[in-house]
Image: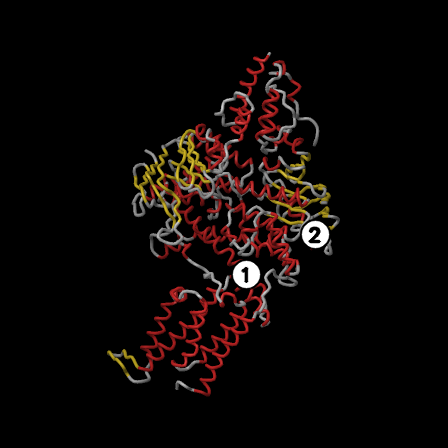
């Protein structure tokens, strides 16, 4: 479990990057953090495994405090981080050597490193590339190796800071499915930072940050149905949600449960036979911006 | 263009030499060098020459590939030959033209020095040809640690990172070069000064990017619990096998014989 | 006068064991003022292709010309060709190197040998084109800018050459939605001013919004070159090449499968919305 309490942080000579962030993430949750550049999401991520330490406030991982010397390395081992640039986080020349880097640092027994590495590579589907030189891999493969390198340390939490921003669509899909698999099959808690909305749709929970604060927090449905508010924050809305929203505004009655194109198509099919009195102008469908975060 | 540079060229294989422990190869190379510098007479190279030929044969690396490693050194070789040929004043004169003369001692010395260089370079090339960069770094780290050389781990880590990033930086150089050419940069024409100046738009972005990479890499290493060499274990365990003993024994005998010859046997004097 | 690639082929490191054919018998004409999208997955030859348009690479076979000037290694017109065809690489901000934004943008015009006054007016124009206030930014260090600003400054550096054709490789990569929308707006404006734009991108939704014509490259060859609607209409064929179609088109295909008679040539959310409303409203009226 991740507990962030009243977290403040300021980079030297800059405005305050985090202005009192509170966040609790239960074990096993897939949390997506949205927000445009400079909203503080990366700064928050770096606090989760002690790369940054709070100016004030507290970060607790399973009760381990990042500001407590005695807890520090245990905490860092528990929270793995994957960064944006696939080229700048692989250290060794070959896939398996790189995957072994973490466990080697932890001083794990050589025989055990071997099994950690093998399992980690299998978990991201990279076992066949074990001996490959990392610079010859595609972007998506590099990111999966980066995830394997973290998984080989047997973490409980995986923090990914825009891991697909530099990838092509294929690489994006590879990384997304690897992360979802780890969450579903191994129960890894995931904190996934992105501004690609499609990637947020399958999360358990979405948090939106703006100017160092959490401004929205809810299920993907709850968040994305607040289309106007997201636009105000200059964020995208998944295309299906946007389309549903526009149709609703034009008086077309669609349920507020649509996130994907498939769901939208089904809803439209169902609506295809609706009576005409539900069409243009009938107001009740046009105010979905209810509830949730103030 | 830049991609043609090959670094740490490894020639894949399964030979006896390939399978040797990298430490064995490093230590044997060290003793072989001592052997080479012990030789004082041209003909005394024969023992080590036999050794070299055996080693190259065993390696399974084509002789052509081994000698390719000499290519960047040929100017040095030529210089060694010429300087020794013309600069020696002792010995019987073989050929003379005005103040230039070649003596038999000079010829001997030239060939002797060049041969020494060739033998040294060939066996060193063979080390990199039969050992992957990873194993070489590993071996080096452990040998240095054994010899109490300080910063052994740091040096090895630097080597690993350099090996990892050289291809990336070469790609990047090419990309930035093209981007600047696309907006009017000219890296080809002009005198030396203009050429040097034209490199600024290439070097600054490269430098900036290298620093950014270093920054991010340091962060990634830290995130993966890196805290120096202390208490660190390794995935790859190096183990001496029977072959290593054999390699040590053979190398040592050749080197020992060379030394023995120099001081006592004097077979070729 | 256009950019013409006439049956060109290109192989990397020819005559070596590493020889890698990258383009095979490609013909492409880019006319002035056009807005052309190029799609193809990584390694399909897109980057190789665009580098042939301004003489960064030279065709092994076939010929290439820009406004009638042949693109050849020793051509005297090479400088002029590179000026006319502006190429913005992926992550162009990596090419910034000067002390100030204005100096960096001036690099291109200066290399053309323009006077100081001309250079400055070009810098002002180029910065204006990417919505960077000259007075605010000209003295700023390019390295202190935000990600989106850096990218725009770098694009200004290419625009300052006043090209007739602008080729951009993944100009939105790594930007947040905000930064992306800014650049989209600028591209549209530049195109309105008569600049031909070639947009290479993986992001089909943006291609659908911007381009009029779409070229698909697969394994070093052009497989489609037609209007955007026509090309995206081949969803199944594109999928086989590992390429997506815009989300709205996917929706329309699903709806059609479900028996709703929606048209299959809508590209943007706006068009899709109208089409759905039209069809479903008629539908319901008919039912009542």
**Between A207 and A253, the one nearer to me in the picture:** A253
For residue A99, side relative to residue B64 (left or right): right
- Residue B256 at least partly seen: yes
Q: Residue furthest left?
A: B97
- Residue C133 at least partly seen: no
Residue at 26%, 79% in the rendered image: B99
Q: How is the image coloured?
A: secondary structure
- Residue assigned mark 2: A75
Residue at 31%, 77% in the rendered image: B86
For residue B23, what is the image quadrant?
A: bottom right
- Residue assigned mark 1: B158
Residue A220: % across, % down = 65, 33
Q: Residues within 10 Å of mark 2 (few under 14, many from 20)?
A: many
**Between C268 and A56, the one nearer to me in the picture:** C268
Q: Secondary structure at mark 1?
A: helix
For residue B181, side relative to residue B99 (left or right): right
């Amino acid at each position: 479990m991740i507990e962030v309490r009243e977290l403040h942080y300021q980079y030297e000579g800059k405005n305050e990057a985090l202005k009192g962030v509170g966040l609790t993430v239960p074990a096993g949750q897939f949390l997506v953090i949205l927000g445009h550049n400079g909203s503080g999401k990366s700064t928050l991520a770096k606090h989760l495994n002690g790369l940054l330490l709070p100016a004030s406030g507290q970060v607790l991982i399973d009760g381990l405090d990042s500001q407590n010397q005695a807890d520090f390395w245990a905490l860092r081992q528990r929270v793995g981080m994957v960064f944006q640039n696939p080229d700048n986080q692989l250290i060794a020349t070959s896939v398996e050597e790189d995957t072994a880097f973490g466990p080697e640092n932890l001083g794990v027994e050589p025989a055990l490193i071997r099994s950690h590495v093998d399992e980690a590579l299998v978990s991201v589907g990279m076992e066949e590339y074990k001996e490959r030189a990392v610079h010859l891999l595609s972007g998506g493969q590099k990111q999966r190796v980066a995830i394997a390198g973290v998984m080989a340390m047997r973490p409980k939490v995986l923090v990914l800071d825009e891991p697909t921003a530099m990838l092509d669509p294929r690489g994006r899909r590879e990384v997304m499915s690897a992360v979802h698999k780890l969450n579903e099959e191994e129960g890894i808690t995931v904190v996934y930072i992105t501004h690609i909305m499609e990637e947020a749709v399958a999360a358990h929970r979405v948090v939106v940050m703006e100017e160092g604060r959490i401004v929205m927090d809810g299920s993907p449905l709850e968040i994305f149905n607040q289309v106007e508010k997201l636009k105000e924050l200059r964020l995208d809305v998944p295309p299906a949600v946007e389309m549903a929203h526009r149709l609703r505004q034009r008086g077309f009655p669609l349920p507020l449960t649509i996130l994907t194109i498939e769901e939208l198509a089904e809803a439209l099919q169902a609506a295809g036979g609706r009576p005409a009195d539900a069409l243009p102008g009938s107001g009740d469908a046009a105010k979905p911006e209810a509830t949730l975060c103030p | 263009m830049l991609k043609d540079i090959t670094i740490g060229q490894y020639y894949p294989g399964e030979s006896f030499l390939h399978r040797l422990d990298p430490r064995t190869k490093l230590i044997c190379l060290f003793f072989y060098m001592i052997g080479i510098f012990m030789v004082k007479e041209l003909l005394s190279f024969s023992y080590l020459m036999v050794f070299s030929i055996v080693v190259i044969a065993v390696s399974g690396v084509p002789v052509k590939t081994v000698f390719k490693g000499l290519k960047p050194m040929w100017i040095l070789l030529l210089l060694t030959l010429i300087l020794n040929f013309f600069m020696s004043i002792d010995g019987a004169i073989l050929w003379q033209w005005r103040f230039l003369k070649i003596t038999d001692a000079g010829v001997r010395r030239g060939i002797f020095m060049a041969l020494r260089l060739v033998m040294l370079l060939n066996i060193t090339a063979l080390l990199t040809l039969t050992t992957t960069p990873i194993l070489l770094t590993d071996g080096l780290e452990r040998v240095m640690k054994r010899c109490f050389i300080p910063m052994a781990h740091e040096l090895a880590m630097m080597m690993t990172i350099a090996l990892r990033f050289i291809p990336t930086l070469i790609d990047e150089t090419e990309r930035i070069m093209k981007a600047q050419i696309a907006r009017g940069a000219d890296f080809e024409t002009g005198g030396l000064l203009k050429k040097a100046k034209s490199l600024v738009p290439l070097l600054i972005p490269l430098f900036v990017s290298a620093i950014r990479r270093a920054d991010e890499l340091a962060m990634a290493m830290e995130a993966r619990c890196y805290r120096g060499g202390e208490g660190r274990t390794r995935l790859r365990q190096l183990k001496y096998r029977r072959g290593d003993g054999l390699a040590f024994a053979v190398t040592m005998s050749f080197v020992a014989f060379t030394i023995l010859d120099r001081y006592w046997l004097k077979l070729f004097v | 006068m256009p950019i013409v690639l006439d049956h060109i082929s290109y192989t990397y490191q020819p005559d070596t064991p590493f020889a890698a054919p990258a383009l095979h018998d490609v013909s492409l004409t880019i006319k002035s003022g056009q807005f052309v999208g190029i799609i193809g997955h990584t390694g399909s030859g897109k980057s190789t292709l665009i580098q042939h348009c301004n003489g960064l690479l030279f065709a092994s076979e076939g010929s290439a010309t820009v406004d009638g000037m042949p693109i050849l290694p020793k051509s005297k017109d090479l400088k002029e060709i590179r000026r006319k065809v502006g190429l913005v690489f992926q992550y162009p901000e990596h090419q910034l190197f000067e002390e100030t934004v204005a100096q960096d943008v001036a690099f291109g015009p200066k290399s053309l040998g323009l006077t100081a006054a001309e250079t400055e007016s070009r810098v002002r124009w180029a910065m204006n084109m990417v919505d960077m206030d000259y007075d605010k930014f000209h003295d700023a260090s390019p390295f202190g800018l935000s990600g989106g600003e850096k990218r725009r400054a770098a694009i200004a550096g290419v625009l300052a050459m006043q090209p007739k054709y602008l080729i951009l490789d993944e100009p939105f990569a790594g930007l947040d939605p905000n930064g992306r929308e800014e650049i989209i707006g600028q591209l549209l404006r530049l195109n309105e001013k008569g600049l031909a734009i070639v947009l290479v991108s993986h992001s089909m939704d943006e291609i659908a919004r911007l381009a009029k014509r779409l070229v698909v490259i697969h394994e070093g060859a052009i497989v489609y070159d037609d209007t955007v609607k026509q090309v995206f209409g081949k969803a199944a064929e594109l999928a086989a090449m590992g390429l997506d179609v815009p989300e709205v088109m996917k929706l329309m295909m699903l709806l059609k499968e479900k028996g709703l008679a929606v048209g299959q040539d809508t590209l943007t959310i706006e068009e899709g919305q109208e089409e759905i409303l039209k069809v479903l409203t008629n539908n319901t009226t008919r039912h009542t």
